[in-house]
Amino acid sequence: MQTGLSPRAGAYFLDYTDCGAFLLYGSCRPENAESFLEAMRNEAKLIVSDSVQEHEVDRVKTRRRTSLAIESEAPYYRLTQLMDDMESHGAPRSVDQMLAEVDAVSADSIRSYFERFPIDTEGHLASVGPRHWPNGG
C-alpha cells in the first residue's frame, strides 16, 4: 500500500494441518483507521482482480529461497522450522522439500488460490487501540 497511512502493512498466511487463515494487517494512527481500512480493502481487490505479475512472484521466491538457505544453516531457525512443520504439516520437511514448494508457486497458482479463497470480501475485522471502532466511533 502506497497511501502513506501505515508505516507497516502486509499479509500473512497462518496454516495448520486442517485449516488456515489469510491475514491482512497493518497499523495506523487512530484518526486514519477508516481510510486505512478502505486502502487495505482496495489493495485486496486489486490483487484479486489484476493479480500478481510473474516478476513480482520471482522476486518473492528469490527472497524466500535465500531465507531458507540462511535459516537451514542456523540451528535455532532450523529448530523453529521443524516445530512449525510438525504443527502445520504433521511431519518435518527437508530444505529440499521447502525449496520445491517455493519453486511450485507461480502467478497462475496464486490466481487459482484467490479464486478458491478470495481476500476481497468483508472478512473479519479486529482493531486494537484507543478507539471503540469500527462500531463505536
Image (cartoon, grey):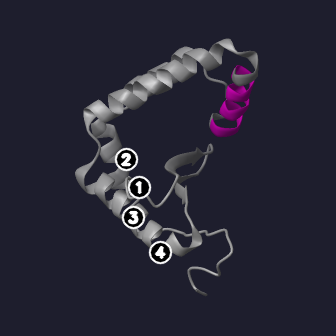
* The label number, if any, that marks residue 113 in the structure image: 2
Can you see residue 16?
yes
Secondary element at image label 3: helix
Q: As shown in the figure, which amino acid type bears the numbered disc 2?
A: Tyr
Secondary element at image label 2: helix
Give the spatial CA distance, label 4 vs label 1.
Answer: 25 Å
Residue 30, x across and y down, in percent: 58, 72
Sequence-earlier tag: 2 or 4 = 4
Secondary element at image label 1: loop
| Magenta part of the chain | 78-88
Quadrant location of residue 131?
A: bottom right
Q: Which residue is mark 3?
A: 39
Sequence-earlier tag: 3 or 4 = 4
* The label number, if any, that marks residue 34 in the structure image: 4
Sequence-earlier tag: 3 or 1 = 3
Residue 44, x across and y down, in percent: 37, 58
**Residue name at image x 55 percent, y 70 percent:** 125
